[in-house]
């Protein structure tokens, strides 16, 4: 399949181009505002599908709204009309419009006029798909141009101030990944001949996130602060996942790494590296040969241990029945060892080299209520 992307060096265009590169049997053609319009005719003669993403939303003079968003769209459609009518073949056409097409402002009015051009040109062999896009955000968006999310992420990541004029204002957001996946589904539908000729507006309702500006600023700020507190937001799904991914993409290269606290004593080292709101925390520790760590029990807290280097002996004693149990594990055969409430436990390095152990606890450490009580697993009084 051969595809043209206009505005290919823009925010959405860059993301779409990279997505299409990853699909076999796709040939990509691009067009930007810096190229001669005459180039378009030779491209249109080759392609099966056009993603018309070129446009302006912050021109130096208002007339550029009409020149780029309206006149260029009309010229592009006329070229496609000639191609489909003379060669009797179908071409798909996606137009990136805006939700502002419903508003009375120069940008919105120019997008509405461009939509009307598509709707008026109802040809049997051209399949028009109109996306009325809200505030689209994600990697490669320009701060102070494409998105308020881009501006907040860029400024916070670079220690610059942000401005929130109306904290309670709600904005609708669309993550670039969700938009690109919608483009992909549309291509599949077009190739399978299930698409309907003429035009249709694409419904993105299920992919839209709504958030207040104050909440947006607070969330992105929390991503920055998590490097100090080690407390991560729920970044695995939904809006927070998308915002976190976007924030990380604006980090200066010299901040790709950051330090975490390291505690050292004669037993070895202990390092915490991640805490979660409700799924516990992650850390690792080392133990020198012959060193025993632990020697305590918990009432509710549970832990998972994974020896990633060395050999370990785990010992357990029930604090009520005094029942004793021990087991060995080694990094050669990865196994999880889990502690159980009401059982005291310790771990000894029984190898000849330094032992390294990953540790997950189901709750973050709380100095006010640590739920950790000293108890000797090997106690002569209970033998």
Image (cartoon, grey):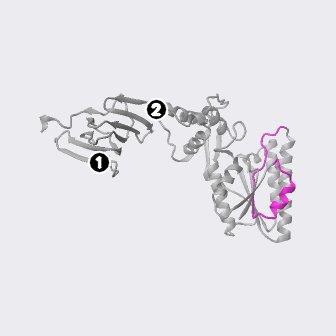
> Rounded to the nearest whole Å, what is the CA distance between mark 2 and mark 1?
28 Å
Residue 39 or 362: which is nearer the viewer? 39
In terms of image quadrants, where is residue 42?
bottom right
Where residue 239 appears, as percent x and y from the top left, is 57, 45
Dominant secondary structure of the residues highlighted in magenta in the image: loop
Where residue 2 appears, as percent x and y from the top left, is 73, 63
**Quick one: quadrant of the C terminus?**
top left
Q: Residues within 10 Å of mark 1 (few under 14, many from 20)?
A: some
Looking at the image, can residue 133 be seen?
no
Looking at the image, can residue 89 be seen?
yes
Q: Which residues are magenta?
A: 33-60
Q: Return the mark for residue 260.
A: 2
Helix, strand or loop under label 2: loop
Q: Residue at x 77, y 68 (%)?
A: 90
Q: Return the mark for residue 34.
A: none
Where residue 301 appears, as percent x and y from the top left, is 32, 39
**Quick one: quadrant of the N terminus?**
bottom right
Helix, strand or loop under label 1: strand
Q: Is residue 40 magenta?
A: yes
Mark closest to the chain's N terminus, 2 or 1: 2
Q: Residue at x 77, y 42 (%)?
A: 57
Q: Return the mark for residue 329.
A: 1
Q: Is residue 10 magenta?
A: no
């Amino acid at each position: 399949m051969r595809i043209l992307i206009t505005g290919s060096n823009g925010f959405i265009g860059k993301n779409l181009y990279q997505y299409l590169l990853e699909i076999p049997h796709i040939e990509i053609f691009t067009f930007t505002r810096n190229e001669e319009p005459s180039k378009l005719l030779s491209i249109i003669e080759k392609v099966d599908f056009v993603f018309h993403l070129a446009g302006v939303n912050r021109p130096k003079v208002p007339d550029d709204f009409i020149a780029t968003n309206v006149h260029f769209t009309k010229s592009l459609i006329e070229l496609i009309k000639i191609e489909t009518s003379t060669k009797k073949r179908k071409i798909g056409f996606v137009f990136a419009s805006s939700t502002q097409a419903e508003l009375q402002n120069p940008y919105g009015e120019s997008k509405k006029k461009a939509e009307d051009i598509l709707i008026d040109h109802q040809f049997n062999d051209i399949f028009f798909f109109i996306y009325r896009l809200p505030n689209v955000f994600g990697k490669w968006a320009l701060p102070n141009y494409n998105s308020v999310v881009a501006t907040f992420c860029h400024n916070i990541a670079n220690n610059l101030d942000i401005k929130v004029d109306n904290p309670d204002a709600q904005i609708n957001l669309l993550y670039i990944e969700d938009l690109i996946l919608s483009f992909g589904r549309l291509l599949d539908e077009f190739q399978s001949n299930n698409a309907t000729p003429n035009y249709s507006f694409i419904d993105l309702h299920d992919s839209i996130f709504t958030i207040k500006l104050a909440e947006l600023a607070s969330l992105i700020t929390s991503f920055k602060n998590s490097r100090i507190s080690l407390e991560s937001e729920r970044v695995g799904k939904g809006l927070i996942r998308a915002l976190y991914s976007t924030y990380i993409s604006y980090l200066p290269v010299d901040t790709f790494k950051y330090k975490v606290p390291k505690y050292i004593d004669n037993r070895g080292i202990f390092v915490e590296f991640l805490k979660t709101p409700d799924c516990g925390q992650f850390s690792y520790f080392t133990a020198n040969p012959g060193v025993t760590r632990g020697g305590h029990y918990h009432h509710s807290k549970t832990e998972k241990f994974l020896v990633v280097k060395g050999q370990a002996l785990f010992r357990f004693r029930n604090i009520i029945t005094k029942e004793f149990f021990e087991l060995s594990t080694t990094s050669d055969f990865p196994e999880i060892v889990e502690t159980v409430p009401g059982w005291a436990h310790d771990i000894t390095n029984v190898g000849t080299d330094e032992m390294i152990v990953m540790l997950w606890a189901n709750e973050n450490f709380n100095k006010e209520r640590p739920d950790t009580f000293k108890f000797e697993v090997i106690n002569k009084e209970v033998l």
